[in-house]
Image: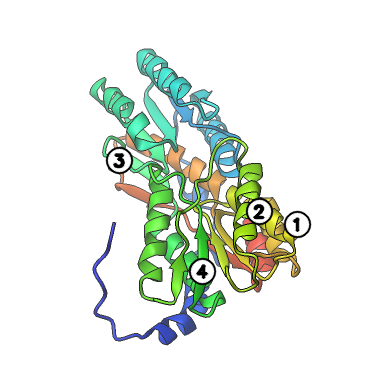
Amino acid sequence: MRIEKSESGLGRRDLLKLSAAAGVAVAGASLIGQKPAFAAGEELSLKGKRIAISATGTDHFFDLQAYNAQIEEVKRLGGEPIAVDAGRNDGKLVSQLQTLIAQKPDAIVQILGTLSVIDPWLKKARDAGIPVLSVDVGSTNSINNTTSDNWGIGKDLALQLVSDIGGEGNIVVFNGFYGVTPCAIRYDQLVNVVKYFPKVKILQPELRDVIPNTVQDAFTQITAILNKYPEKGSIKAIWSAWDIPQLGATQALAAAGRTEIRTYGVDGSPEVLQLIADPNSPAGADVAQQPAEIGRTAIRNVAKLLAGQTLPRETYVPALLANKTNVGEVTKKLGIG
């Protein structure tokens, strides 16, 4: 998990100065003036094709948006969607993948999932001659994975956090889903950034976010941490690889009157962006993805593949880092403000 130290001559103070401006600019510039990606794929067709869409769950904003967008895009391109939702149950997910393989669709698109659970079944699908594509799944059995640039997301969010706390202080980290590829990448990038700031410490043991009851569980765990560290300044920030734990943590901070602590997460759920827009809320920053566009892009990649086109290993859809300064601009660009 460790990454070798860079030979860069930049010191910690230089990195701090660059972090907020560079991180936001890099994450945000790619969307400015960009036309919707689907406009270029209007000539694509899935007429007569049956496309299986397998979702690990749809209880989260990202998952539901990507899932619904895929169903709609398959229909728009003239295909028949076979959509299944496992409801965050790994046993059901495996059973559904088995059923889909038996139905021999023209392609399977897997949305998220713990790699150790789903990968054997993605391999079985490919062995059966069914093309497999994915959303946020780092599997060698996926021909193409449509996702955000999670390396960039993890770096930008970590640099924003470190900049906001002045390069020193204790941070609380949720790390419950390291088996999910995007979460692992974002966590590794946090660790890689923090190691260059020796005055920033990740408190041990790390917290474990859970599904379901994510918000309430995060609220309970953060309340316990605040009781353990009652002095202001003893904790500077709380980080999570997605933004539902951030929501519970933010609520716990507000309830305890500890709004000097900032929270950080990923996905861009509307309720979290609303908290960031509130100057009195401890929500500090959140990287907003475009789940509906990710879903549509994955289906267009299916159409391209079935039309004989060669796909890249990964297709990246831009994300935007929203903080207290730019959240209004970000929500406007994403069309959810």
Circles 4 and 3 in contact, beta carbons < 8 Å = no
Which residue in the structure is indicated by mark 1? Answer: 255
Is 334 left or right of 130, judged from the image as shown? right
Which residue in the structure is indicated by mark 4? Answer: 170
Q: Position of residue 46 (x, y in %)?
A: 44, 29
Label 3, secondary structure: give it.
loop
Q: Earlier in the sequence, mark 1 or mark 3?
A: 1
Q: CA distance from mark 1 to mark 2?
A: 9 Å
Please name which of the two marks, 1 or 2, marks the residue nearer to the observer: 2
Q: Residues within 10 Å of mark 1 (few under 14, many from 20)?
A: few
- What amino acid type should be assigned to the residue bearing mark 2? Thr
The residue located at (50%, 50%) in the rendering is 207
The label number, if any, that marks residue 309 in the structure image = 3
Label 2, secondary structure: give it.
helix
- What amino acid type should be assigned to the residue bearing mark 1? Ala
The residue located at (36%, 86%) in the rendering is 11
Which residue in the structure is indicated by mark 2? Answer: 223
Is residue 287 something one can see in this rendering? no
- What amino acid type should be assigned to the residue bearing mark 3? Gln
Circles 1 and 2 in contact, beta carbons < 8 Å = yes
